[in-house]
Amino acid sequence: MTAGKLLLATVFSASAFAQTGKPDLSGIWQVLTPANFDIQDHSAQPGIPAGQGIVEGNTIPYKPEALAKKKENFRNRATADPETKCYLPGVPRITYQGLPFQIFQNSKGLTILYEYAHANRDIYTNGTPHPKGPIEWWLGDSRGHWEGNTLVVDVVHFNDETWFDQAGNYHSEDLHVVEKYTLTDPDHIDYQVTIEDPKVFTRPWNIDLVLYRRKEKNVQLLEYECYGFDLEKYYP
Amino acid sequence: MRLILLTALLSGLAQAQQPNLQGYWDPTIGGTYSITDPSRGGVGKQEQLGVARKHNPSRVIDPADGQIPYLPWAREKQKYIQANINEPTKQEFIDPQARCLPDGPIRATFWHTVKILQYPGYVIFNYEGNHPHRIVPLDGRPALGENIKLWMGDSRGHWEGNTLVIDVRNNNSKSRLSNVGDFASENLHIVERYTLVDDKNLKYQATLDDPTVYTKPWTIASDFHRVHTEPNYEQWEEACHEGEHNVADSLRLK
C-alpha cells in the first residue's frame, strides 16, 4: 500500500465532521429537577427535596390493578427500587436520575455516555428500524430522526424490571418511549417524553423537563460506579 | 478576529484529518487470564483438571524476559491472590471482573471487542465487556485533580502522525490487570500508543509505570485487527452486573 493510498484509507473524509445541518446537542448536560425521587408532585421528606412533578397534569393514568401495584412498590421502595441494586435504570429515568451525561453527535448519529455506571446509548439516525423483537434490554433500543430542529428518539425493547423513580412508578416490557430533544438556546434542551404501555396505563402520558448545559471551566464526565455490596471491606 | 477564525479553521482541519480508528477491534490473542501467558478464561479449571493447553507468548515486551518487574512484596501479593483465585474461600479472592466491576483501561482492552468512536475533539472507547467507556479529549486540557481516582482512569490524548498517544492517570487500580492477580496501585501512570498500520490493522503498546509496585516501567504490546466490518453492524446492550450470579454461586459452594 502506498503512502498516498494509506492516507486515503485512513484519513477521515472531511464530510464526516461537516456541519450536519442540525442543531448540535454535543456537550455535558444535567437536570435540576429532583424527579428521580418522585416524578409527581411531592413534599419534602428527610433527605428528599420537595419537587414539582415532571408529569404533564401530574396524573399518571394507571389501570386500577396497576395503581395497586404502584402503591405496593411505594411501600417496598427502600429495597424494591431497582436503583438500590445498581441496575441500569431504563429510559427516560437515566436522563433525570441526577448525574451528568455527555452527548456526542455527528452526521451518522449520536452517542450518549452517562456518568452513572458507565451506561451508554447509541442513537442511530441512519434510518434503520428497530431490530425484530422480542428483545428485553435495560435501556431499550433507540432509533432517532429529526423533525425540524427536534431530535425524536423512538425507544422500544425494554424489560419490566426498571422503575421511573424511587416512588415506585413502573411499567411493563411493552413500554414504548418517544423522547424529543429540542435545543431552545445554546445551553438548554427541552426534553419531552411520551410514555405508552397499554398493559399498565389507560392512555399515553407525557413528561416535560429541561436539560441544562454544564459550563464550569474544564468540566468533564467522571464516574459513578454503582455496586450493591461492601466493596471497600473486601477490596481495600 | 481573523486570527481566531484562522485558528478555528486549522483546528477543524486537524480534527478532520484524524486517522480513522472508528469501528470494532479485537487483539490477535484475546483474553485477560494472564498477561505473561495470555489466554481466554476457564484456564484455571483446565489446570485443575490437568487439561493440556496451548501457551501463548507474553504480552510483555519490556523487560526482555517477558515478566512483570514486581517489587518483592508485590510479587508475593500477586502469587497469594493467584493461589486462591480458583477456589475462593473469601470474598476478596474473587476477581473483581467476576463481579462486573470495570476492568481498568488495560484489561478492558483485551477482554471483549473494543469499539472506537471519533467525534470532533474526542476519541471514545466503548468496551463491550461490562460496557465501561473512556472519553479521551484531544484538546490539550489540563490534567484532572490528582485526588479524583477513577476505575477507567483519566485520559488525555494527542496524535503523533498515525499514532494516538494517550496518557492515563488518576487510576483507582481497584480492578486487577489479569485473572491471576496482577495489579497496580493508585500511582499507576499508563502511556498507551495506538498505531494504525493500515485500515484493518492496529498496533497497541502500553507502558505501565508505578514505582510503588514495580522495580521499573514495563511495556506490553499486541496487534489488533478490525472485526464486524459489515456496514450496519451494531454493538447491542451488554448488561453484566444485572444478571451476575457467579459470586453468590461460588461462595455458596464452599
Image (tube, coloured by chain):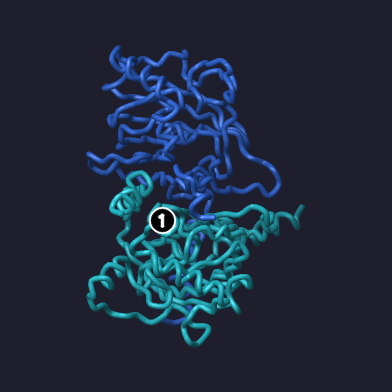
Chain colours: A blue, B cyan
Label 1 marks a residue whose chain is B
In percent of the image, x 36 and y 19: which residue is there?
A72
The answer to whether residue B128 is visible is no
- Could you tell me the amino acid type at mark 1? Lys
Q: Residue at x 30, y 60 (%)?
A: B230
Indicate the position of residue B162 as horizontal and vertical percent values. 53, 73
Number of dots carrying numbers? 1
Q: Position of residue B11 (x, y in %)?
A: 64, 60
Badge 1 crowding class, 10 Å Cα cut-off, few under 14, some 14 to 19, many 20 or more, is: few
SS for dot 1: loop
Q: Please say if A18 is above or below B21.
A: above
Toward the bottom, the furthest residue is: B64
| Residue in front for this viewpoint, B53 or B122 | B53
A229 or A100, which lies in front?
A229
Q: Is residue B27 above or below residue A175?
A: below
Left or right of A200? Residue A106 is right
Q: Which of the pair A172/B33 is nearer the observer? A: B33
| Quadrant in the picture for the C terminus of chain B | bottom left
Does residue B46 lie above or below A181 as drawn? below
Please give the residue where the numbered disc 1 appears in the rendered image: B90
Q: Residue at x 32, y 41 (%)?
A: A137
Residue B165 location in percent, x, y?
57, 69
Nearest the eye: B166 or A167: A167
Report the residue at 56% width, 33% height from top.
Answer: A189
Residue A15, image x and y in percent?
49, 57
Residue B87 in view, yes or no: yes
